[in-house]
Image: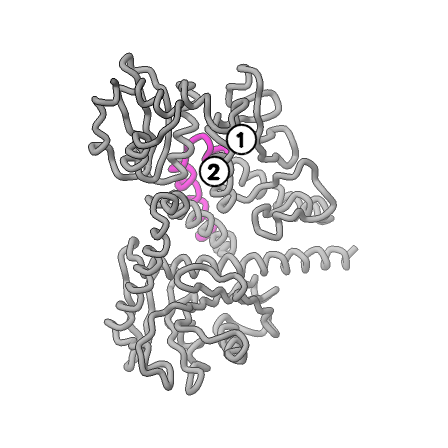
Amino acid sequence: MGNRKINWRKLPARAGVYLFKNEAGHVLYVGKSINIRERVKGHFGVRGRKSEAMILDTAIVESVPVGSELEALLLEAALIKKYLPKYNSRAKDDKHPLYIKITTREEFPKVSTSRHEDDSALTYTKSSSAYFGPFPSSGTVREVLRQIRRVFPYCSQKGIGNKGCFYSHLNLCNPCPGAIVKIEDKELRQVLKRQYRRNIRRIVMLLSGKIVKVKRGLAREMAKFSKKEKFEKAARVRDELRALEYITAPYSPTTAYLENPRLLEDLRETEIKELHQILRLHGMNINKFVSRRLEIKKPRRIECFDISHTGGASAVASMVTFINGEPEKNLYRRFRIRGGRTKDDFSMIREVIKRRLNHTSDWGEPDLIVVDGGKPQLSAARQYLKGEKSFPVIGLAKRLEEIVVPTDGGYMVLRLRSNNPALNLLQRLRDEAHRFAQNYHFKLRLKSLVAERLTKN
């Protein structure tokens, strides 16, 4: 029996792809996992005709570790395309090979899935579309597209409507072709069209496995915008880069959860404990910031605030809430700044904090408030955090990812390692607040620009 030669204990316990081969070295099956060792081990405990036959035929198991779940998904598809393994062709729902299809000759290219009945489709390009795959299952395709769409939104509608599609409201189709074609201003329409087609080019590169190249391109683009003082554009590219870094991070709870149902809870608990410990060690005993609390509370409920505007125009603020390290979207709030053009960022923060504190009875109370910014923003936020409404507050400065903590004598700046669980929690919270504020600002700004053009005409 071939499987007697297999020692799964020597396989790496990390994300990647594994190949089952027979005595002749022919690839029988290609699989992927967030933990190669545990996944391969699981194959040898599965009963069933197909599984038992595959194990009997297997003489060698090879592994290819990668950096993230997304890379594993893409590499799995590439290896299946290359080797056409015997047992992958008998996969769950594959009546015909399953591909990701991107149209190439449309004004606004579309992303969808497709099955083909003929071998001629087993190429990456055809006359009017590009194909990527084949993928082992529809579930794999959905996961790949779900992760990519979070970074580079795209349109999946068959035709362009006369208004923004459903996914545009979820920021998964942004800018939306349906909204772009309605804009009468030719220059603005072309800008948004280029932005949409840029997203498609990035998606093609990711599906081609050029993840590092995409990251470098985004970093260069962000630096270029910053140098030209186009800070709003630089911030948008920065957010794309952060989102891409997130989905290509070494461990992804999405898949790991299937192997360890408590993994996500454990990760979040570690983040909360680490944050609580850091705040206590650096003079910010949460107990002394909140009146009539006898115990030191862990920051279970954290709220983060961010401001977004363009030269004071369409000024908005966001409040996002995490409970036990996870987004609680029914507790999200957004604010339109009153008299935005006459205020600076610090005045805007003061206004939003004051308005939020007026709702402690109906919105609930935070264990910790996080402000997107450094000492000046934190000072502005603290102006109203007094007496009965004295909640702990810290800042997260973008430039060097520094945590700014108020102390009895002023402020302390903390610089943590990039993989510190507490910093990762705060970054995730801050990025979500920024995304929520940016989306609201973009909608108001677009509406305002359209109204201005209509008025001029």
Q: Are marks 1 and 2 in contact (CB under 8 Å)?
A: yes
Give the Cα distance between marks 1 and 2. Answer: 9 Å
Q: Earlier in the sequence, mark 1 or mark 2?
A: 1
State the residue lying farthest toward the top: 24
x 43%, y 73%: residue: 366
Residue numbers of the magenta segment: 203-226
Of the residues shown, which amino acid type is indicated by label 1? Ile
Q: Position of residue 247 (x, y in %)?
A: 41, 45
Which quarter of the image is occupied by the N terminus? top left
- Observer-nearest of 313 and 438: 438
Image check: 23 left or right of 105? left
Q: Position of residue 339 (x, y in %)?
A: 61, 74
x 59%, y 60%: residue: 440
x 50%, y 52%: residue: 236
Q: Position of residue 30 (x, y in %)?
A: 37, 26
Q: Position of residue 182 (x, y in %)?
A: 73, 47
For residue 13: magenta? no
Dot 2: what SS? helix
Q: Main secondary structure of the magenta part?
A: helix
Which quarter of the image is occupied by the C terminus? bottom right
Of the residues shown, which amino acid type is indicated by label 2? Val
| Label 2 crowd bin: few (<14), some (14–19), many (20+), radius 10 Å | many
For residue 215: magenta? yes
Reading the image, the residue beneath label 1 is 100
Image position of 4 with respect to 37: above or below: above
x 48%, y 28%: residue: 92
What is the count of numbered marks? 2
Residue 400 in sight: no
Dot 1: what SS? strand
Reading the image, the residue beneath label 2 is 144
The disc at residue 228 is: none
Residue 295 in sight: yes
